[in-house]
Amino acid sequence: MAVIKNKEVLQSYIITSAKYDFSIYEKRILYRQIEIEQELLLGQTIKPGVIIETNLWKDKKYTIPVKWLLNGEEDKNHARIRKAFKDLMSKIIEYETPDAFGAFPLIQRFDLDKRSEFVTWQVPHEIVDVIVNFAKGFRKYELKTAMEFESVYSMRFYELLSGQTTPLTYTIEQLKSMFQIQNKYKLAADFFRNVIEPAKKELDAKSPYSFDYHVNKEGRKFHSITFFPIIKEEVTEQQLRKYSPKKLSSEVEN
């Protein structure tokens, strides 16, 4: 449970922070919300299949095809989609002001229609406000890239490294805590093999941002990792051309 005292902290918790235990399917749900709100902000026609409803309290319902949360045609794992929505419902945000105290979930409810293959979920207005604010500053091609990752570790490194130009250093224990895997990979070599290297490989292949890294020792033990951000200018330029404002205003994505 997170205790939130301002919108900036709430935005960091929901979207930009890699500290919390969001699965790759939970991330895709959040990214889809951003995508829909971004299209509204850009004045684009909402894609066929999307329904948006707003109630008197400014809570929103989003309806989209289930397949938009899956990873391509080969991914048929609806059980993981159901689990992702239930897990988001269980993530409670507490808030406190000088005058009040309260709490709300990231998602209030969801309904997955087995026959029509559509899913609807309702989001509290506090979360809607954060999603809209974040959509204003999230570049379209970065959102598209994030949706294509197969590893949640790739997503989290992508979020950490996007736009970074200076080295970042984290202890191995800090990284494990950020990724909620404190009790896994007792050997540092296993952590590198199962977390760092797969994320780097996927970022190298798919992302305008990647990294090199150096492992730092404290005595004879591996202690921390320094990440050196890499911005692949040629990929960034290609993506910018592909998702230029003119292109964005006319495209209808699958």
Image (cartoon, rainbow, N blue to C red):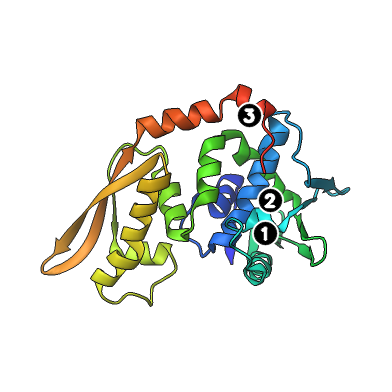
Instruction: Assess whether mark 1 and mark 2 are in contact (beta carbons under 8 angstroms).
Output: yes
Which of the two marks, 2 or 3, is nearer to us in this view?
3
Q: Quadrant of the C terminus?
A: top right
Could you tell me the amino acid type at mark 1?
Leu
Instruction: Assess whether mark 3 and mark 2 are in contact (beta carbons under 8 angstroms).
Output: no
First of labels 2, 1 by sequence position: 1
First of labels 2, 3 by sequence position: 2
- Which residue is pictured at 35% across the width and 45% down the height? 210
Mark carried by residue 127:
2
- Of 76 and 119, the residue lying toward us: 76
Which of the two marks, 3 or 1, is nearer to us in this view?
3
From the viewer's perspective, is residue 189 above or below residue 156? below
Circle 1 sits on which residue? 106
Mark carried by residue 248:
3
Q: Is residue 138 visible?
A: no
The answer to whether residue 179 is left or right of residue 148 is left
Q: Quadrant of the N terminus?
A: bottom right
Instruction: Assess whether mark 1 and mark 3 are in contact (beta carbons under 8 angstroms).
Output: no
Return the residue found at the far front: 74
